[in-house]
Image (cartoon, rainbow, N blue to C red):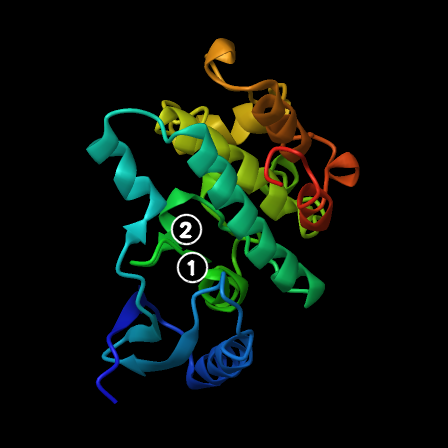
Amino acid sequence: TGEIVACKIVPCGISDEELAGVTKEIELLARCMHPNIVTFRRCHRWRGILWVVMECCAGGSVDRFFPALHQPLPEHLIAYICHEVLVGLNFLHERKVLHRDIKGSNILLTESGGVKIADFGVSASVLNTLSRRNSSVGTLHWMSPEAILEKAYDARTDVWSLGITIIEMAEGQPPNFHFQQMRAMFEIPKQPPPELKDKAAWTPQLHRFLARCVVKDHTRRARAADLLNDDFIR
């Protein structure tokens, strides 16, 4: 068709039966059509590698802008990105799909300035299959305390990760990024909720919004649908 696509390349050692299950899940996820979600086309295995074909977002990922700007993202852009991500997350959560790996590198921009969540299919199905030895799924510094501790968690784990992504967008990296993974695994669950370092650089609305995202007790944490009504992003 001449369409330009992107390919997610995942080294794997899964069986034909597991591949069939992953393929079926991605085909189902491909039908989750939404303006704020990268569309999946198909997947296949070739030479021990799983190739996941998806929509191409030519603007690149949000985290690529930090080195180019040499400064934090402006607050109005953080608010815009948060709104668009939450619209996409709310769509997924209403369909009982968790992303489980929200971070700057999984938030993509289109040439026209659109914002799309990437890799939700890989997080929800492929990594679930490839990581059966470990029930934690996600990138550790962005993971919620309950996910790190392998406790029961729900869609609000994505809200925590969005909160960490806000700090990433504001400061160039997530909190505890200087810790090695093993130490971060111990520190994140026991630390108080993370905050922005420079309190005066940001509005009270952003500080309050972030605080709603990073409530340690996930049963008291806001859901994506709740946050869509927050003054910070309205």
Furthest residue toward right: 219
Q: Quick one: SS at disc 1?
A: loop
Q: Where in the figure is residue 145, as x and y percent of width and height?
A: 62, 35
Vertical side of 199 occupied by 233: above or below = below
Residue 180: quadrant of the picture: top left
Q: Does dot 2 land on a helix, a strand or a loop?
A: strand
Residue 127 % position (x, y): 47, 62
Residue found at x 62% / y 25%:
205
Quarter of the image containing the N terminus? bottom left
Q: Amino acid at mark 1?
A: Ala
- The residue at the point 33 percent across, 58 percent down is 112
Q: Which residue is mark 2?
A: 107
Q: Residue at x 59, y 55 (%)?
A: 87
Other residues around mark 1 within 10 Å, as few (<14) / some (14–19) / many (≥20): many
| Residue that sits furthest to the bottom in the current view | 1
Amino acid type, residue under disc 2 in the picture: Ile
Whether 139 is drawn above or below 197: the answer is: below
Where does label 1 land, which residue? Answer: 118
7 left or right, relative to 87: left
Compare marks 1 and 2 and give the one earlier in the sequence. 2
Neighbour class for label 2 at 10 Å: few (<14), some, many (≥20)? Answer: many
Measured in 3D between alpha carbons, the distance from the residue under mark 1 to the one under mark 2, in whole angstroms, is: 6 Å
Q: Is residue 1 left or right of residue 212?
A: left
In-front residue for pair 27/125: 27
Q: In the rendered image, is residue 143 in sight?
A: no
Asked whether the beta carbons under mark 1 and mark 2 sit within 8 Å of each other, the answer is yes
- Identify the residue shown where x is 73% and y is 44%: 226
| Residue 204 left/right relative to 44 | right
Q: Position of residue 49 (x, y in %)?
A: 28, 73
Using the image as rendered, state which of residue 200 and residue 97 is in the foreground. Answer: 200
Q: Is residue 234 above or below residue 50?
A: above
